[in-house]
Image (tube, helix red, strand yellow):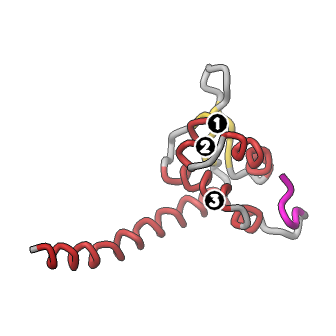
């Protein structure tokens, strides 16, 4: 799948963020550091069809955002790469999770107060 502008002047993360499916795949991998996923399992966790993963896999590999891991099985598994851009995604995911947790706490407290 060609990104809208896939040349050397387009930053790798820009080539990710234009596709919601890519963001979903990378979010699953970023939220599960140290884990690897098979293609079908990754698609299920991302809420997409396996064919969607297949359509984006090669670009994500070419961008050095994911790595193929050999598990001794028939099919490869995938994990977030250890490149600077991939680690930036992991840190961004952690920061967003923390922010969302912070935002949800006052809401939970308010809802809990109404229920009492």
N-terminal of the pair, mark 3 or mark 2, is 3
Instruction: Report if residue 48 lies within the magenta region.
Output: no
Q: CA distance from mark 1 to mark 2?
A: 6 Å
Answer whether residue 2 is magenta in the image: yes
With respect to residue 88, does 34 lie above or below?
above
- Left or right relative to 77: residue 105: left
Instruction: Where is residue 68? Give x, y as percent.
Output: 68, 37
Q: Say if mark 1 contacts mark 2, CB within 8 Å.
A: yes
Quadrant of res 12: bottom right
Q: Residue at x 36, y 76 (%)?
A: 103
* Extreme residue in the right direction: 7
Q: Report how many numbered discs are placed on residues in the image.
A: 3
> The residue tagged with tag 3: helix, strand or loop?
helix
The location of residue 41, given as percent across then percent down, is 56, 37
Comparing 47 with 34, the one in front is 47
Q: CA distance from mark 3 to mark 2?
A: 12 Å
Residue stretch rendered in magenta on the structure: 1-6
Any mark on residue 39, and which?
1
Instruction: Classify 10 Å Cα crowding around label 1: few (below 14), some (14-19), many (20 and above).
Output: some
Q: Residue furthest left?
A: 116
Say above or below: 27 vs 58: below
User: Which structural element holds mark 1?
Assistant: helix
Q: Secondary structure at mark 2?
A: helix
19 lies left or right of 110: right
Which residue has dot 2 on it?
A: 43
- Residue 2 image-quadrant placement: bottom right
* Residue at position x 63%, y 39% in the image: 78
Would residue 51 be found to the left or right of residue 96 on screen? right
Percent from the top left, x then y, of residue 54?
Answer: 74, 41
């Amino acid at each position: 799948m060609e990104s809208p502008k896939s040349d050397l002047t387009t930053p790798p993360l820009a080539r990710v963020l234009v596709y919601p499916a890519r963001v979903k795949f990378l979010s699953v991998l970023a939220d599960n550091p140290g884990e690897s996923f098979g293609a079908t399992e990754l698609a299920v966790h991302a809420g997409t069809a396996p064919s969607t993963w297949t359509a984006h896999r090669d670009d994500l590999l070419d961008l050095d955002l994911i790595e193929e891991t050999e598990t001794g099985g028939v099919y490869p598994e995938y994990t977030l790469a250890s490149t600077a851009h991939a680690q930036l995604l992991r840190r961004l995911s952690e920061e967003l999770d923390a922010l969302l947790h912070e935002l949800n706490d006052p809401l939970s407290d308010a809802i809990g107060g109404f229920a009492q």
